[in-house]
Image (tube, rainbow, N blue to C red):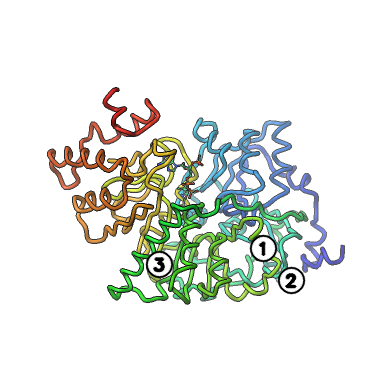
Amino acid sequence: MESVYKRIQDQRLQERVVSAEEAASWIQDGMTLGLSGFTRAGDVKAVPFALAKRAEQEPLKVNVYTGASLGSDVDKLFAEVGMINKRLPFQADPTMRKKINQGELYFIDQHLSHTSEWIRANVLDPIDFAILEAVSITEDGMIIPTTSIGNSMAFAQHAKSIIVEINLAQPELLEGIHDLYEPGSQGERSPIPLTKPDDRIGSMGIPVDIEKIKGIVFTNQLDSPSTIVAPDEETVTMAQHLIAFLRQEIEAGRLTNRLAPLQSGIGSVANAVFHGLLDSEFTDLEVYSEVLQDAVFDLLDAGKVRFASCCSITLSSSKMEQVFSNFEQYRDRLILRPQEISNHPEVIRRMGLISINTALELDIYGNVNSTHIMGTQMMNGIGGSGDFARNARLGIFVTKSIAKDGKISSIVPFVSHVDHTEHDVDVIVTEQGYADLRGLAPRERAELIIERCAHPMYREQLTEYYQEALKKGGQTPHVLEKAHSWHVNYAKNGTMLQKVVQHM
Ligand code: COA
């Protein structure tokens, strides 16, 4: 037990250790909770379960704010029990997704850099409890986060009370890799003094008023592993196209072999594309990203990446085992930051990031939909993709050109929902090729996207639409009555292919 208490150095706090059930009993119907956790990493693992158990037996609905998606099926459980009134800013769970789309809970799909600003400015309901996973609490009252930081700093500083879950399964070696920086109120703040991915600008933990810490719960459970799938033939080809584009940038003198700090989005496609850099000639790379997935650790191991800054580490179970059993070798090459800093427009623009995110669909003019299936059904959320795409040196979007065995074209006349407007999208990469849209007018963009990125089975159909649109004229030609006909056709006939449209 002595070693366990080593993780709480302040004597006064040692007396506040309670069970998860007791901590959960303090939470009342209608409260707002700020939970640590970002893409399955560093999430609280005991109190949410105890709370869901209570919600099975008594009326209990709460608002849940997090960094991003939670692990341990907590979002699934919360959704099943029906205990969520409002959830923000991101989720990625199929059950919660279903409930959101059925209108059973409110979901605010928000740029991930914005949540802390709203909390700081009292835009949102005040947070009753911040419930945060920690490696330890230091003598001077700092909470040391675990594998993510997310919005934990804002939650801790603005919540009325704090519950800390000290997770003994999270290695103490994590102490020292966090960099907590509080930018201050808008209109009163100075420039964020961050010019390189490895700059340290803050403290190693979250400074809190220890009187706010109402209880401490011990847990001993690893993060949930990520669900990404291994690269396939198409994602490998996409990586090759991306590398070809980057080589063109080097030839043009706009980049060197060191490229620029890289950001890659979540999911299997983004991971596979990053993985492709392993076989490239690029060296001495830096990563300034939101989530570090497996591929970044492969690149660190291969000596391709020199340094990586992020706000969460989300790994498959084999990679988690490998990384955390050898964590010493990564410690001085990693920094974890709050998500408002990892995703901060000021920093992203200053460093000139190369930003690679995944689209669900995009249109012939370069507008991107990353969130809504067929225009209405929420997938996960915009996450940090907007923070990065709009402010990066290069806003790159990758997607396979078709989905669902070709029944869906990922390139459509007009996206059914817009997350990233044509103004924020510089380059598109599919397994067919890449389209560099910079400096191109809408009519030039349409021709290039159809020719280079669309799947051959949809190319003619896209060209027909575009030709018809051209007859109507305009800066951005469209046949408005047909702009969403491909989605309508899919809803009615299960395919976007035109020949079925003709029989409608
Ligand atoms: N229409 C309908 N479904 C589509 C589709 C489209 N145009 N394109 C892809 N899909 C489906 C796929 O078939 C797949 O379905 P399945 O789960 O039933 O197999 C699913 O969407 C996921 O697609 P996949 O190709 O496996 O992509 P992914 O795992 O790389 O995830 C996103 C892609 C867009 C869902 C994911 O990257 C995301 O949520 N992005 C938004 C947030 C973000 O970018 N954050 C990063 C900032 S750091």
Name the amino acid type tagged 1.
Asp
Closer mark to the observer between disc 2 and disc 1? 2
Residue 153 is at least partly visible in this image: no
Q: Name the element at disc 2.
A: loop
For image coordinates 77% across by 66% down, the residue present is: 7
Q: Position of residue 118 (x, y in %)?
A: 48, 53
Q: Which mark is residue 209?
A: 1
Q: CA distance from mark 3 to mark 1?
A: 36 Å
Decide which of 345, 128 is in the foreground and name it.
Answer: 345
Q: Name the element at disc 3.
A: loop
Q: Residue furthest right?
A: 1
Q: Which residue is mark 3?
A: 353
**Res. 91 image quadrant:** top right
The first of marks 2 and 3 along the sequence is 2
Q: Residues within 10 Å of mark 2 (few under 14, many from 20)?
A: few
Q: Is residue 244 above or below residue 430?
A: below
Q: Which residue is mark 2?
A: 139
Q: CA distance from mark 2 to mark 3?
A: 38 Å
Q: Residues within 10 Å of mark 1 (few under 14, many from 20)?
A: some
Residue 209 is at least partly visible in this image: yes
